[in-house]
Structures are given as C-alpha cells and as structure tokens.
Amino acid sequence: MMREPVFTGACSAIITPFDESGAVNYDLFGRIIDEQIQRGVDAICVCGTTGEAATMSYVERMRTVETVVRQVDGRVPVIAGTGANSTETAITLSKDAALAGVDGLLVVTPFYNKATQRGLIRHYETIADAVDRPMILYNVPSRTGVKCAAETYAALSRHPNIQGVKEASGDFALIQKTRELCPEDFYIWSGNDDETAPIMLLGGVGVISVAANVVPREMRALTHACLEGDFVTAGKLQLKLRRLCEALFWEVNPIPVKTALAMMDRCEERLRLPLCEMEPGNRERLWDVLAEYGLV
C-alpha cells in the first residue's frame, strides 16, 4: 500500500518569537501561526533551524511544540524538528513530540559526529523504530558537515516510518539519483526556497520554507502550480521571488528572516546568541528588497 505524504505544498519553517526577557513569546507565536494558516500555508514546521531550536532547553522546546499543536488545532499538519547528534536524544525528542500530537518529525543528519553512511542508516532506523510518526530526513551538509548518499536514502526508504527527505544539499545529481533508486512513496521536499520549482520538476512534492514566513501566499502558489503540473507558471513565480529568497540568506538563517519580519512589524527583532543582529549594510539592502516586493 502506497504511503501518503504528511503534507504537500508549502510548509512554513516557522520562526520562534522572543520577548524582551529572551523567553519565547507564546502570545505572539499564536498570532503568527494563525496568520500563516490564514495566508494559505499547507503545514507548519516548528523547532527547526529557522525556529532557533538549537538555542532552546529541552523543556522550552517541548512547550513550544505543544503550543503549536494546540494553536494549529488540526487545521494543517504540524511537523517538529527533533534531530540531534546523539541518537538517544533524538529518540527522546521524537517520542515526546509524538506525545504532544505532531503529525510528523523532521530529523536532521547528526551534525559534528560526521557519521559514515552505515552510521546514518543505523541512526535513522533506530529513531524510526522508536516512534509511530512519519519521519522526514533532513540533508543539509552546509550546516552539519554530513551528506546522505542516494543509496542511503534507498536503504532507509524501506522503513515504514521513514517517509522521505528535506533536501537542502543543492545537489541535483543526488536528487535525480534518489528519485531513480527510491520507491514512489519516498517523498522529496525542497529545503532551499530558491530551488523549489526545479526540485518539484524532478518529483518533489513541496518545500519546507523560510520564505513562507514572509510570503506564505506566494510560496503556496508556487508549490501548487508545480503540483498541478504548471511548471511555466511555477518557473515565473520562482524567478519573481529570486531576489527575496537570495536576500533571506545574505546572513545565516534565521537572522535575515527575523529582521525582515521585524521590518514588516510582524515580530520583534530578537535572536539568541550566538546569532546576533544583521550587519548594517545587509540590513539596508534587505529593506530595499522588501520595498521592491511591497512588503514594507
């Protein structure tokens, strides 16, 4: 029986707003979630890279996941980032996120340890054996120093709880080989906003998106054009969004997207160290790009 993807289309890799004391601003978070859903996102990903999960305590991370599940209230799927470079920690995070009611798990490759491909397979299979939620692998070698091979995806695709991968390697040869080696119900999601249309042309089913925090309707329109097979429209939308997608990565994510949302009066510009405020020159350029798009 073919597995259905936990979501298709545009999933917002949602920011985590902080208050002046540095704590999570749960009231504002609820309003941001509602706005994202009202503007058409197909899913919410909480406690990912964009959500600054690496700076959160365990208790804070779980409370944030619970808050999102409660606020979303079944309107769209909720995916929680539960990856760690310790397999045991990733299992604990994944189990507790499942208990909180998430619909899926996003599990990044174990950073710093630089596991072998055999180690990656054992890491992911051990986590997947311990949970009862669909799991999305997350391949982002620019951040982790580890890269999955297509053969690794093929081995992992046989596990009933491993549903696919968020691909942020920028390696289109890898994506093509993955599509060739893996079954149809091993799904691929874009992990880079500026590669969404080409990845979906190669069989991807959506994007886990930073840009959706800023332009949720546009990211939904782009992905749904792809899902409908209208790649001419999707290509035009991808090109139209190029400058914005580029600007949101002028500095390490989520510095630019939080700065952009603050400029749009959607949140306070508060990040947790070691992330800090955007460089003045980049800030001015970002304002200009947002103005181009009529966002400020």
Image: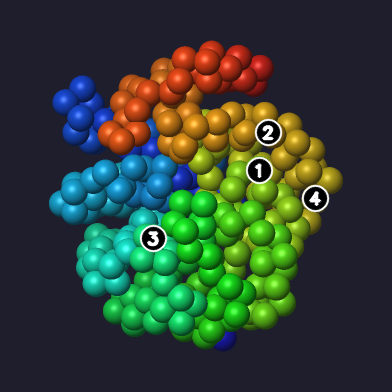
* Residue 8 place in picture, x, y as percent: 58, 58
Q: Amino acid at mark 3?
A: Phe
Q: CA distance from mark 3 to mark 1?
A: 24 Å
Residue under label 3, please give it: 111
**Does any portion of residue 161 appear in the rendered image?**
no
Q: Nearer the viewer, mark 3 or mark 4?
A: 3
Q: Which numbered marker is on residue 194? A: 1
Q: How is the image coloured?
A: rainbow
- Residue at x-position 41% and y-position 78%: 119
Quote the CA–CA distance across marks 1 and 4: 15 Å
Which sits in the foreground, 126 or 234? Answer: 126
Residue at the image point whose x is 71% and y is 50% from the top: 197
- CB under 8 Å between discs 3 and 4: no
Q: Residue furthest right?
A: 232
Q: Earlier in the sequence, mark 1 or mark 4?
A: 1
Q: Residues within 10 Å of mark 3 (few under 14, many from 20)?
A: some
> Residue 140: where, in percent of width, then height?
51, 56
3 or 1: mark nearer the eye: 3
Residue in the picture at 23% in, 35% down = 24
Dot 1 amino acid type: Asp
Contact (Cβ within 8 Å) of mark 4 with mark 2 = no
| Cα gap from disc 2 to disc 1, whole angstroms | 8 Å
Q: Secondary structure at mark 4?
A: helix
Q: How much space separates mark 3 and mark 4, taking CA atoms?
A: 35 Å
Q: Which residue is pictured at 18% across the width and 48% down the height?
A: 57
- Mark 4 belongs to which amino acid? Phe
* Marks 4 and 2, how far apart at CA: 15 Å
Looking at marks 2 and 3 on the same chain, the residue that comes earlier in the sequence is marked by 3
Image quarter of residue 267: top left
The local crowd at label 1, few if under 14, some if 14 to 19, many if 20 or more residues have their Cα within 10 Å, is many
